[in-house]
Amino acid sequence: MRALLLLAALLLAAPARAQDQAEAQALVDRATLTVQEIMGVEPGAEDSRDLLRRARAAMVCPQLLRAGFFFGGEGGGCVLLARDAAGSWSSPAFYGLASGSFGLQFGIQDAQVLMLIFTEKGLNAVLDSQFKFGADLSLALATVGAGVEGSTTAAAGADILAIARTRGLFAGLALEGSLLSARSDWNRAYYGQEVGSRQIVVAMQVYNPGSDPLRAALIRYGQGGAAAPAPTPASPPPAEVAPGPGLGAVQSSPLPPIAGPRR
């Protein structure tokens, strides 16, 4: 009887895992387009690429929706990738961003956000299972519009710089108070095993070929060139653990492991 119950549980869980994997791949595909649009077509794209070349890691949020009528809220999915010593990028770890507020507000906003993380302190903070923007007063966060001509000084001394393309009635983008949470269910579905964000982006222990277009865009724009539009996979490819040749290989020269979160 116990074996039958276990089998039934596995059969019921399989569709949920397949849906999580499909949604995770769709988020990665949208993140690829976000990097291409912010780094390739916006005014000041060269300044954005210069900032990317200096970044230790990047978090891409393809669509943050913000709406409010007295009570407001904001949310969306994000992916985090880190760079190794050779200039290549890890596979993505998955996060969700959410916030709530109360006040005199009305409007709706749709934003694409690319957060460039310049310091180990900033990366350590984001790697926490839950991180609240603005709560750590020692962490410097700056936000600029997608057209960043002449505004690279905003990154001076910043641990994290958010580049935002916004559409809607709200002016600008406020990340303070937003809660960033790891999506362990999507990590598990995308890589076919239990794996944490630090294992994915720092230790680089897993790899999924579906993230290759996103990694290629970050590599090419981070080297100063314009990345050609990357194809979007028609369906989620199978997760892999063993590295393959070329771009898809798990990086063999990662930066030294960073210390765990401060207590």
Image (cartoon, rainbow, N blue to C red):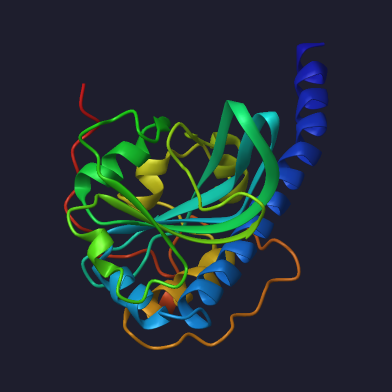
Q: Position of residue 146 (x, y in %)?
A: 47, 68
Q: Position of residue 29 (x, y in %)?
A: 63, 65
Which quarter of the rendering shows the N terminus?
A: top right
Q: Nearer the viewer, residue 125 or 22?
A: 125
**260 shown above or below 8:** below
- Does residue 159 appear in the picture of this structure? yes
Q: Nearer the viewer, residue 147 or 80?
A: 147
The residue at the point 82 percent across, 19 percent down is: 4
**263 shown above or below 48:** above
Q: How many marks?
A: 0
The residue at the point 30 percent across, 75 percent down is: 150
**75 shown above or below 256:** above
Residue 51: image quadrant is bottom left
Residue 73: image quadrant is top right
The residue at the point 75 percent across, 65 percent down is: 235
Residue 52: image quadrant is bottom left
Q: Position of residue 81 (x, y in %)?
A: 41, 57
The answer to whether residue 161 is left or right of residue 104 is left
Q: Nearer the viewer, residue 180 or 144?
A: 144
